[in-house]
C-alpha cells in the first residue's frame, strides 16, 4: 500500500431516498490491510486511477480504496465489515464492461477479483469445469480445448475479459445463437452474500428443479446480490471443424431479412453476425485488412457452421448460400483455412474497437425477435435523422441482438450531452420494446441504462426486483446505484 495522497479521514455521500454512506476511510483501510495484507490494498491516487473507469463512455468514479482478496473467507470478512459500517462495495473484473456496472459511483471499496485467477478443475468425465472468476475467458477456452472440450461463450473482449464479468452480465457473443449465453452454460456458483455468508447456489448437475433457481438469479445480477467466487461451467465436445462465410448484401435491410429466412429454411449456424457498411469499412481500416468491399454493398452477414465432421459442413454451406441468394448479394467470401477464417472474424471482433477509435460513442445493446431486425434497423436510421445523430450498427443477428453505436463525430458538446440526444435514445428504446424486445441483451443495465429501465419493465417488475435486492442486501452496500 502506498500513499501519495492520504485518504480523507471521513467520507459522506448522500444518495437519495434518505440513504447516506458515511465512513472513516482510515479505519476502513486499516481493516482491509488486516484482512488481505498491506500489499493488496491500494490507496495511492495514481494506482486508483485504472480502477476508476471501464470501457463505458468517458465515465470516471474514483474509489476510496481498492482491495484484492484471494479467498472467499477474505471476501466474507470484507463484506461483514462493510455491511456493519454501511460502506459501498463494488466488485470488479477486468474492466471491459460497457454499462458502467463495475464503477464505484458512490466511492467506497472496489473489490478487485484479479487474484481469483485459477482453473480449479476440468472434469472430463462429466464435461464440466470449476473456475475462479478472475480467469480470462479465452484462457479458459484454450485450457478446455486442450482436453478436447468446448466452452462456447466468447464475447468480443474474450482475450481480456474475466469470466466473473461474463457471469455478472450473462455475456453472450457470436456463438450464443447455437450454444446460449453465459446463463445457459453455468451449473452452479459459490457466492459470498453481502452479509458475509458463503453459499452454493445449486448443484453440479444438468437438471435442477429444487426450489428457486438461485444460480440463474445470480447470473446477470451485475454484482448487486453477491460476489461470485467459483463457477461450475457446462462443457461439451469441441467442434473440430468449421467454415465461415462473409456474405455481402446490397441492402442492409435485406441482410436483416435474410437472418429470419435462414432459420425458417432449417439452417443451424453456430454464428450469424450482422455488420452494416460503416462498421465493416471502419474495421477494415482499423485492422488494415486486405478485404475489399464494392461500392454497392451496404451490409454483410458473417455466418459460421461447425461440427465434429468436416464432410457434414459443406451441405450446410450450400443450403445457406441457396437461401441468401434469394436476396441481392455480392460475391460471397468463403473461409476454410485458418488464415481465411481469421481474416473474416478479425473484422467482426475488431468492429467495437474500430468504432471507439473513430469517435466518441454511446453503445446501446438492443435485442428484438430476430424477424423484426429489419424494422429495428430502419427505425433507428429514421430516429437518427429526426434527432440529429449518426449510428453505426452491428451485432449478433442470429439472436436479434443489434449493437447500436451512436457516434459523436461532428456533434458539439452541447448536442452530445443535451436533452435532444437523450430523448432520441429513449425513442430508440421505445421502438425496441414496441417490437417485442428489450434494452439490453448482454451488456447489462448497470449505471448508464438505469434511466431507461422503466421503458422495458413495468413498475411491478421493478418492485419485485427491488424486493429481491433488499432480501440479499438489506443495507444496500453491494454495487449500489446500478440497475434501479
Image (spheres, rainbow, N blue to C red):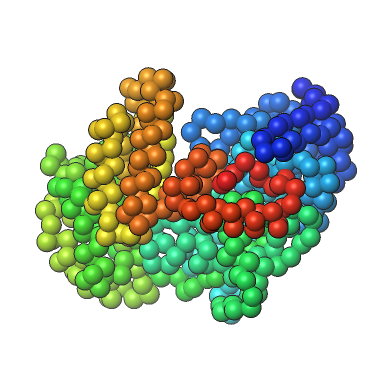
Instruction: Give above or below for 180 relative to 392.
Output: below
Residue 108 percent coordinates (x, y): 73, 36
Residue closer to the observer: 143 or 86: 86
Report the residue at 38% width, 30% height from top: 421
Across and down, in percent, residue 432 comes to 35, 50
Where is the N terminus found, in terms of image quarters?
A: top right
Q: Is residue 339 visible?
A: no
> How many numbered discs sit on the rendered protein?
0
425 left or right of 322? right
Place of residue 341 in the rendered image (x, y in percent of width and height, measured from the top left) = 32, 55
At a point 21% along the width and 57% down the height, the residue shown is 257
Residue 243 lies in quadrant: bottom left
User: Which residue is found at the position 47% from the left and 74% from the top?
Assistant: 237
The spot of residue 220 in percent (x, y) is: 55, 56
Answer left or right for 369 relative to 92: left
Rendered residue at 55%/53% (across/down): 462
Q: Is residue 83 left or right of residue 287?
A: right
Q: Is residue 399 above or below residue 46?
A: below
Vertical relation: 246 (above or below) 319: above
Above or below, 1 relative to 395? above
Asked whether the viewer can see residue 437, the reply is yes
In which quarter of the view is residue 8 placed? top right
Amino acid at each position: 500500500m502506498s500513499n501519495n495522497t492520504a485518504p480523507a479521514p471521513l467520507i459522506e455521500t448522500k444518495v437519495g431516498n434518505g440513504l447516506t454512506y458515511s465512513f472513516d476511510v482510515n479505519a476502513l483501510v486499516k481493516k482491509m490491510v488486516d484482512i488481505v495484507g498491506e500489499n493488496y490494498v491500494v490507496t495511492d491516487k495514481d494506482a486508483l486511477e485504472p480502477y476508476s473507469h471501464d470501457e463505458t463512455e468517458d465515465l470516471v468514479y474514483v474509489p476510496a480504496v481498492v482491495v484484492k482478496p484471494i479467498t472467499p473467507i477474505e471476501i466474507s470478512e470484507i463484506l461483514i465489515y462493510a455491511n456493519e459500517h454501511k460502506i459501498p462495495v463494488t466488485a470488479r473484473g477486468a474492466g471491459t464492461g460497457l454499462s458502467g456496472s463495475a464503477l464505484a459511483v458512490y466511492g467506497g471499496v472496489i473489490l478487485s477479483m484479479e487474484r481469483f485467477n485459477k482453473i480449479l478443475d476440468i472434469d472430463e468425465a462429466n464435461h464440466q469445469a470449476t473456475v475462479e472468476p478472475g480467469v480470462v475467458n479465452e484462457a479458459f477456452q484454450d485450457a478446455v480445448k486442450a482436453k478436447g472440450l468446448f466452452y462456447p461463450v466468447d464475447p468480443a473482449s474474450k482475450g481480456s475479459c474475466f469470466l466473473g464479468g461474463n457471469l455478472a452480465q450473462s455475456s453472450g457473443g457470436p456463438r450464443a445463437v447455437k450454444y446460449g449465453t453465459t446463463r445457459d452454460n453455468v451449473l452452479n456458483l459459490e457466492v459470498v452474500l453481502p452479509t458475509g455468508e458463503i453459499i452454493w447456489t445449486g448443484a453440479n448437475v444438468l437438471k435442477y428443479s429444487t426450489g428457486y433457481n438461485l444460480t440463474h438469479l445470480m447470473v446477470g445480477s451485475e454484482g448487486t446480490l453477491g460476489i461470485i467466487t467459483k463457477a461450475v461451467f457446462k462443457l461439451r465436445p469441441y467442434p473440430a471443424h468449421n467454415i465461415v462465410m462473409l456474405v455481402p448484401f446490397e441492402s442492409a435491410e435485406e441482410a436483416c431479412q435474410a437472418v429470419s429466412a435462414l432459420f425458417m429454411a432449417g439452417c443451424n449456424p453456430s454464428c450469424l453476425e450482422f455488420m452494416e457498411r460503416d462498421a465493416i469499412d471502419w474495421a477494415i481500416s482499423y485492422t488494415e485488412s486486405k478485404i475489399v468491399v464494392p461500392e454497392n454493398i451496404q451490409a454483410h452477414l458473417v455466418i459460421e457452421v461447425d461440427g465434429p465432421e468436416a464432410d457434414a459442413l459443406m451441405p450446410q454451406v450450400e443450403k445457406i448460400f441457396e437461401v441468401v441468394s434469394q436476396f441481392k448479394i455480392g460475391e460471397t467470401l468463403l473461409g476454410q483455412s485458418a488464415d481465411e477464417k481469421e481474416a473474416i472474424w478479425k473484422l467482426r471482433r475488431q468492429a467495437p474497437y474500430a468504432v471507439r477509435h473513430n469517435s466518441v460513442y454511446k453503445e446501446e445493446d438492443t435485442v428484438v425477435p430476430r424477424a423484426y431486425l429489419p424494422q429495428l434497423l430502419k427505425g433507428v436510421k429514421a430516429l437518427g435523422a429526426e434527432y440529429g445523430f449518426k449510428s453505426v450498427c452491428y451485432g449478433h443477428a442470429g439472436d436479434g441482438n443489434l449493437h447500436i453505436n451512436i457516434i459523436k463525430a461532428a456533434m458539439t458538446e452541447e448536442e452530445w450531452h443535451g436533452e435532444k440526444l437523450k430523448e432520441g435514445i429513449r425513442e430508440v428504446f421505445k421502438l425496441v420494446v414496441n417490437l417485442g424486445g428489450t434494452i439490453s441483451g448482454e451488456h447489462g443495465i448497470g449505471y448508464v441504462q438505469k434511466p431507461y429501465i422503466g421503458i422495458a419493465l413495468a413498475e411491478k417488475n421493478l418492485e419485485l426486483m427491488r424486493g429481491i435486492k433488499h432480501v440479499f442486501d438489506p443495507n444496500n452496500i453491494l454495487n449500489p446505484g446500478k440497475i434501479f
